[in-house]
Image: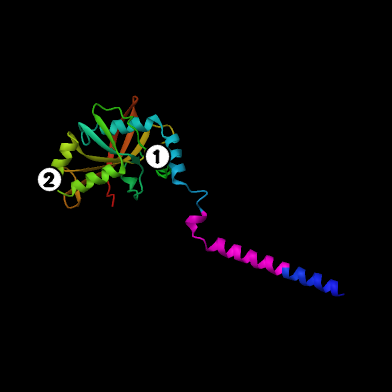
């Protein structure tokens, strides 16, 4: 009888310890911040690599067609190294013939950041700016005319810096949608003292193998 009681007592203690350990594990797991529990799934470096793999040559053809537009034409293009769009979308109803799948593809494509390479087909010099370089240029922007003198001395022929989104296409790749933001000295609205910005969504259509800008929507980025 005494041996049975001892075994029963040991079993109860073991069961109680097991339950308490389980409760501690559950509490610790559920109290962990959401971003920590997502770490095995969400990895920014993997997203960038994924975007690199999915970037098509057609995107660079669209970019090149945009850069050739007189609005952005320059002797030297200073282009930010990451292509993405985190900002709200405008009302696309004002653009006629824009397909819904073009908009959906734009939204889905811009989930991931593309690290741009110098694969632009333009008759001008291209410099891909790191985040540090762009931050330094923006700091010079804020110095007004003196800052612009320094920029022109360091980057002769540049009109400002360009930020590009990923390109959204319709299913048969006859339509394209891209956001282009020009931070420059002239022909743009002020966003800060001595800093100007020209920010537009461009709608392009492919005609006879060439991408043509058909419409644009001015859109604030901040």
Task: Indicate the position of residue 75 as horizontal and vertical percent values.
Answer: 20, 31
Q: Which range is magenta? A: 14-37
Q: Residue at x 15, y 41 (%)?
A: 150
Between the residue at mark 2 and the residue at mark 1, the CA separation in whole angstroms equals 43 Å
Task: Indicate the position of residue 200 as horizontal and vertical percent values.
Answer: 27, 43
User: Is the residue marked by circle 1 packed among few (<14), some (14-19), or many (20+) residues within 10 Å?
Assistant: many
Task: Indicate the position of residue 212 as horizontal and vertical percent values.
Answer: 29, 31
Q: Residue at x 51, y 48 (%)?
A: 41
Secondary structure beneath label 2: helix
Residue 86 in the magenta stretch? The answer is no
Residue 15 in the magenta stretch? The answer is yes
* Disc 2 target residue: 146
* Disc 1 target residue: 102
Secondary structure beneath label 1: helix
Residue 66: quadrant of the picture: top left
Which quadrant is the N terminus positioned in?
Answer: bottom right
């Amino acid at each position: 009888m005494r041996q049975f009681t001892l075994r029963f007592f040991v079993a109860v203690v073991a069961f109680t310890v097991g339950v308490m350990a389980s409760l501690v594990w559950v509490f610790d797991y559920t109290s962990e911040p959401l971003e920590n529990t997502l770490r095995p799934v969400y990895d920014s470096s993997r997203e960038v690599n994924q975007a690199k793999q999915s970037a098509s040559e057609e995107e660079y053809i669209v970019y090149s067609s945009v850069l050739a537009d007189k609005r952005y034409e320059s002797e030297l293009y200073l282009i930010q190294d990451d292509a993405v769009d985190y900002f709200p979308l405008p009302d696309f109803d004002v653009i006629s013939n824009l397909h819904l799948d073009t908009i959906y593809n734009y939204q889905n494509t811009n989930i991931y950041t593309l690290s741009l390479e110098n694969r632009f087909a333009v008759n001008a010099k291209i410099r891909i700016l790191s985040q540090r370089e762009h931050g330094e240029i923006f700091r010079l922007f804020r110095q007004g005319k003196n800052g612009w003198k320094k920029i022109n001395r360091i980057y002769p022929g540049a009109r400002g810096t360009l930020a590009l989104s990923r390109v959204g296409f319709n299913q048969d790749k006859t339509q394209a949608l891209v956001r282009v933001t020009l931070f420059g000295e002239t022909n743009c609205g002020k966003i800060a003292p001595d800093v100007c910005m020209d920010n537009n969504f461009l709608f392009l259509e492919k005609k006879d193998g060439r991408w043509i800008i058909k419409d644009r929507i001015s859109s604030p980025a901040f």
